[in-house]
Amino acid sequence: MLILSRRIGEKIMIDLADDADPNLLARGLFTDGPLEIRITHVRGAQVKVGLVVDQRLKILRAELWRRKVPDA
């Protein structure tokens, strides 16, 4: 499980991993069951989110995703 901390207004980006087949259909990502998103901790304006997803997906904080995709 990947755990990310986010504050109000911050984002988490979920995209295909760099080595994933770009023609992969969404249903292929659910063959082992649903994606799991779990709130693990809340403190004031900060929340910790746990994510369990298919390994063909990458999860990044939005500020890191923008560095990889400059036009976003």
Image (cartoon, rainbow, N blue to C red):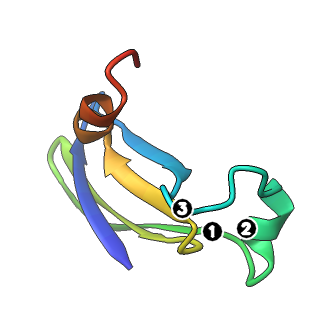
Residue type at numbered disc 3: Leu
Task: Tell me the residue at 43%/43% (across/down).
Answer: 13
Residue topped by disc 3: 57
In the rendered structure, which disc, 1 or 2, sits on the residue that comes first in sequence? Answer: 2
3 and 2 marks in contact (CB < 8 Å): yes
| Frontmost residue, 26 versus 34 | 26
Task: Tell me the residue at 24%/32% (across/down).
Answer: 67
Task: Return the x and y of residue 12 as percentages of the image width and height.
Answer: 38, 44
Residue type at numbered disc 1: Leu
1 and 2 marks in contact (CB < 8 Å): yes
Figure quadrant of residue 7: top left
State the mark number for residue 35.
1
Residue topped by disc 2: 29
Q: Secondary structure at mark 1?
A: loop
Residue type at numbered disc 2: Leu
Q: How far is disc 1 from disc 2 in space, using C-alphas?
A: 8 Å
Q: How far is disc 3 from disc 2 in space, using C-alphas?
A: 8 Å
Side of 22 where 52 appears, left or right: left
Q: Secondary structure at mark 2?
A: helix
Q: Residues within 10 Å of mark 2 (few under 14, many from 20)?
A: some
Task: Tell me the residue at 60%/62% (across/down).
Answer: 20
